[in-house]
Image: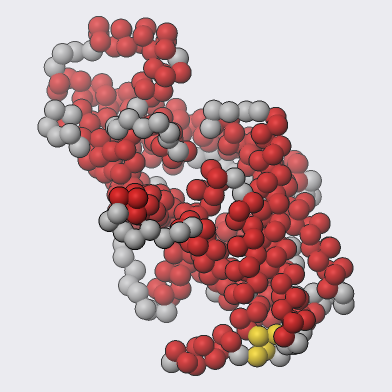
């Protein structure tokens, strides 16, 4: 069985790079130039919107760093896409034939290896868990569709609970640097800490009146904390909805597309989810604070069950993978696991290669949002590869 599979992967395929990749154009060089312009244009549009949205959230906004970040990310994605397409032609010229492994595996491996060092370090730390979670989700879907694995109900809820518990537990320890996920969870679970660090005078006034008027009884404080947590969650959720609606409208106007696209609708799923999460966290933390030093971890774990209200399987898997990778690196530095050089680099390259293989050969199980992103950036490249893979 293994040998027959390897024969399919490394076997010779009928056709040339023109038939596989660019049937509309005879010249490989002209195709590469055409694709380079398309990749750069689509990548620039995508990352301009992305960095404009995330720089203010990260607490920094400088024109020079914004332009540098946009250009680095644009070149990164362009090299990824252009490397894949150009190396199909290069390998065809070298070997004089198209082999099945030359269509996706080898070109994508080389392209991802060249592209990853271009991105900035903070973006690299986000890219690796993102691609690993994508490929785990896709491969799991393939195995479940072929009955190799059973479908486990509420697995995404359990993964989110574990990730939430670990992140909330880490927030209770003093660290010099917090990542993007830590900042978001700190904003959700401990708004008073955000006020203390950024708006100290307002924090002093608010804390004075809270301590003055809050009842001394622990039991009476529970409904107040629950109400305050729910209101805070609703405010953050509503703010998120408003911002995403504005960004959706702006991106639609900037794209200049005349085709009818369904506008993003305003809904209360995320505000209700955040209200339940923060309310649960505040109650659990208040009850457990004098019982165990792990009150933040246990509170985050229990509050994570709120995601069953409105489930985000991709987000749950991403957070779990990111925390798992963080734990692995900690164990490596502590000597409990053997150190793997360029750990994030290797993981990114392997997961990107496998993910693109699934995009071409198993597109029916790739999540629609990622498939839409790939098709938009790659123009006609991936559709051609998909059509060729079905012959």
Tell me which residue sits at (71%, 44%) in the image.
Answer: 71
Image quadrant where one finds the C terminus? bottom right
Residue 179 is left or right of residue 332, and the answer is right
Residue 347 spot, x, y in % from top left:
48, 61
Residue 35 is left or right of residue 211, and the answer is right
Tell me which residue sits at (31%, 59%) in the image.
Answer: 337
Residue 386 spot, x, y in % from top left:
66, 75
Residue 19 spot, x, y in % from top left:
77, 82
- Asked whether residue 355 appears in the rendered view, the answer is no
Q: In which quarter of the view is residue 291 placed? A: top left
Residue 167 is left or right of residue 19, and the answer is left
User: For this rendering, which residue is in front, 105 or 138?
Assistant: 105
Image quadrant where one finds the N terminus? bottom left
Q: In which quarter of the view is residue 107 placed? A: bottom right
Tell me which residue sits at (38%, 40%) in the image.
Answer: 273
Tell me which residue sits at (37%, 79%) in the image.
Answer: 147
- Asked whether residue 61 appears in the rendered view, the answer is yes
| Residue 363 to residue 73: above or below | below
Q: How many marks?
A: 0
User: For this rendering, which residue is in front, 249 or 55?
Assistant: 55
């Amino acid at each position: 069985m293994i040998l027959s599979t390897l024969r399919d992967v490394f076997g010779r395929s009928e056709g040339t790079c023109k038939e596989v990749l660019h049937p509309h154009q005879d010249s490989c060089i002209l195709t590469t130039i055409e694709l380079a312009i398309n990749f750069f244009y689509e990548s620039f549009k995508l990352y301009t919107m992305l960095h404009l949205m995330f720089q203010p959230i990260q607490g920094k906004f400088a024109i020079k760093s914004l332009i540098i970040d946009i250009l680095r990310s644009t070149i990164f994605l362009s090299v990824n896409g252009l490397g894949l397409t150009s190396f199909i032609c290069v390998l065809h010229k070298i070997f004089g034939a198209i082999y099945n492994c030359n269509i996706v595996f080898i070109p994508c491996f080389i392209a991802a290896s060249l592209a990853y060092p271009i991105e900035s370090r903070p973006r690299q730390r986000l890219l690796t868990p993102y691609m690993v979670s994508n490929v785990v989700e896709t491969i799991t879907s393939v195995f479940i569709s072929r009955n190799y694995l059973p479908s486990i109900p509420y697995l995404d809820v359990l993964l989110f609970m574990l990730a939430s518990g670990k992140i909330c537990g880490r927030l209770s320890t003093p660290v010099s640097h917090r990542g993007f996920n830590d900042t978001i969870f700190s904003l959700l679970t401990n708004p008073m800490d955000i006020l203390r660090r950024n708006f100290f005078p307002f924090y002093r006034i608010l804390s004075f009146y809270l301590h003055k008027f809050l009842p001394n009884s622990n039991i009476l404080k529970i409904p107040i904390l629950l109400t305050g947590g729910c209101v805070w969650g609703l405010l953050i959720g509503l703010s998120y909805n408003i911002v995403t609606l504005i960004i959706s409208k702006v991106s639609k106007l900037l794209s200049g597309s005349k085709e009818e696209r369904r506008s993003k609708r305003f809904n209360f799923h995320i505000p209700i989810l955040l209200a339940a999460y923060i309310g649960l966290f505040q109650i659990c933390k208040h009850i457990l604070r004098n019982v165990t030093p792990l009150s933040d971890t246990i509170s985050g774990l229990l509050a994570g069950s709120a995601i069953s209200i409105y489930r985000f399987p991709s987000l749950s898997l991403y957070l779990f993978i990111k925390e798992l990778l963080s734990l692995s690196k900690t164990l490596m530095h502590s000597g409990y696991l053997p150190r793997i050089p360029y750990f994030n680099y290797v993981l990114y390259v392997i997961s990107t290669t496998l993910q693109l293989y699934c995009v071409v050969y198993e597109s029916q199980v790739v999540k629609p949002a990622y498939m839409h992103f790939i098709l938009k950036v790659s123009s006609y490249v991936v559709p051609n590869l998909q059509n060729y893979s079905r012959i």
